[in-house]
Amino acid sequence: MKILFYSVGKPHEAYIKAGVDDFTGRIGKYFPAAWHIIPPLKNAGVLPEAELKKQEAASILQLLQPDDQLILLDERGKQLSSPELARLIQQKANESSRRLIFLIGGAFGVDEQVTHRANHVWSLSKLVFPHMLVRLILSEQVYRACTILRNEKYHHQ
């Protein structure tokens, strides 16, 4: 199974890039992993929020394959502990999923088309974080989940 991270927005800021690259590389010991940054729309600043989300949804949905397992990060999603995330990843691997995709939507979230397409909607926290920080937290948590699956010492319960 390949783990892919999709994020709508600008490329990683330098202060985040090193950490994201480090954790993504570590995940690579367990599963092939990669990031795909979906560039913001050029006219995003002048579009109404609903239209912006609809156009972003079109970009996101065209990247997905029918059998992709999509985990959408959304503040209204279900919160998971690190061991629960590990079990979810293991479940998807056991189901022979080819691609497990974690999606960070745009600044205003995602259109309902994307939410309906998602296999799981996951909230990191009730707090709202900057997108760049979410990328770092997400990559670290997926790495942590991988170490839990292998019963390695990184995660302390």
Image: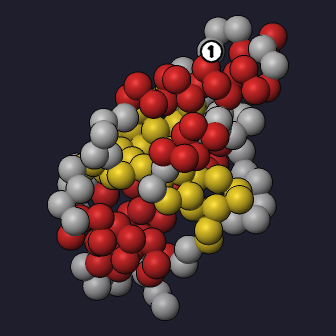
* Image spot of residue 90 (x, y percent): 29, 72
Identify which amino acid the numbered label 1 is placed on: Leu
Q: Nearer the viewer, residue 5 or 97?
A: 97
* Image spot of residue 133 (x, y percent): 63, 48
* SS for callout 1: loop
- Left or right of 36 on screen, residue 107: right
Residue 106 visible here = yes
- 128 shown above or below 108: below
Residue 154 occupies which quadrant of the picture?
Answer: bottom left
At a point 58% along the width and 52% down the height, the residue shown is 73
Residue 10 visible here = no
Q: Nearer the viewer, residue 136 or 37?
A: 37
Q: Nearer the viewer, residue 97 or 152?
A: 97
- Left or right of 57 on screen, residue 6: left
- 21 shown above or below 52: below
- 73 shown above or below 39: below
Count the marks: how many? 1
* Image spot of residue 89 (x, y percent): 34, 67
- Left or right of 17 on screen, residue 87: left
At a point 57% along the width and 37% down the height, the residue shown is 113
- Left or right of 80 on screen, residue 128: right
- 141 shown above or below 47: below
- Residue to which mark 1 is pinned: 41
